Image (cartoon, rainbow, N blue to C red):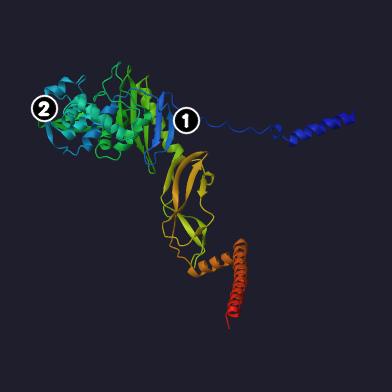
Amino acid sequence: MKRFFSAILVILLIFALFPLGAFADETEEPEAEPFTVQSPVAAIVNADTGTELFAKNADSPFFCAFLPRLMTCIMLVESGLDLQTEILLTKEMMANTHDKSSANLNSGDRISLYDLMKCIIVANSQEACIAVAVTLSGSVSQFVVDMNLRARDLGVENTTFTNVTGQYSSTSKQETTAHDIVKICSHILTLDHIEDLSNSRYTEITVNGAKRSLFTKNSLVDKNSSYYCKKASGLAISGTSVSGYSLASIAVDKTMRIICVIMNYDSVSTLYNEMTEMINFSLNEYSYRTLIQKNAPVLEVPVVFGKERDSVTLVAESTITASMPSSVPDSSIESELIVPESVDAPIARGTVLGTVTYSFEGRVYGTTNLIAQTDISLDVVESYSEAINSFFSNKYLIAAIITVIAVVIFYSIVLYIMNRKRMKWEQSKKRDRITKMPK
């Protein structure tokens, strides 16, 4: 009995010294779920590097009312016309307008091209789009052709424009994709005026010499709106419950600019809320980092016959930057080098001698050439010495030379013997002729 109680005491003592948790299997914390949105179409791209941070059905076609309006502004800015030029709005322009905007333009009005662009971007003005189209191409139909051609020049492959206003029709084939919108928005960032105007909550235009006020349709940039996002900058919003709602925006922080595109059929509220989520995700979870600086040394490669130097430093020809998850340490980024084991002198500075590619988890973030940092001249003496040594160290070549010499000697001996015999024969014939002469 005493043994039984002793055993119980020992067991209790063990449990007191080692809590149950000590025997439990350690469980890993569940991994965070990957970012996503409820909207059927979305894309996030770094505007500076082109790196895609997120995509959902980004190549699926959908109707987008704001894209032809943005494209109209691109055509206007690129036309080279003086944007302060005033034009007269005609009945033809107004007749093709399905829905008038808050700009309230009418035939007979005089307005500058720049103010027309304000109407398009800030007030989503259909009448302003038509006025620009007729001014640039002579007719809306020709402008649509020109607009499609320019889109192809920008690398836009899955977008078709059928009108300039963005007017929805169930029979219209006017479609685009999130990826194509990103390409067009990326080009906008290289132009003047459009981005700045799209970020305006309020602006003024002059029509017939009188001022008019315009207020943005994009609540993302309106400080008085509950959907206001401080980090957002433009670009455009459009849609209805029938055609679907679409929104494109630029977001900026200290290190990078991103382009966000989203489309859904539910509501404008969902559109704005998920756009804000996309912006916060991109700027909080991703960081802009430099993987290699231009002219940064990467490695040394041995040089054969180099004068005063037996190696050359290879440096990066260009800078590689990338938007990457902030949690990824630099040590986890892989670099693949393609370089020769050695190079022969002479070498000119800037000569491409290899490449380096940076990637993470199979995704390539950039490749740059590796170039010679300095000139390296040829050591002529060493080169000739090596050539001579190489010449005499080749046993097959030496054997061939010996064989040739032996053949020449053998041939010379045979020729000598034959010549001796011929001379003796001629002397013998000469003696015979002398002997046979009459005395």
Percent x, y of residue 400: 60, 63
In the picture, residue 237 is in which quadrant? top left
Q: Amino acid at mark 2?
A: Asp
Q: On the image, which quarter does residue 387 sit in?
A: bottom right
Query: CA separation, marks 1 and 2?
Result: 49 Å
Identify which residue is drawn at 15% across, 24% down.
93
Q: Residue furthest bottom?
A: 439
Residue under label 2, please give it: 109
76 vs 240, left or right, is: left
Residue 230, can we see it? no
**Nearer to us in this view, 341 or 94:** 341
Give the vertical position of 399 relative to 111 (above or below).
Answer: below
The residue indicated by pointer 1 is 35
Q: Secondary structure at mark 1?
A: loop
**Closest to the observer, 6 or 439:** 439
Q: Amino acid at mark 1?
A: Phe
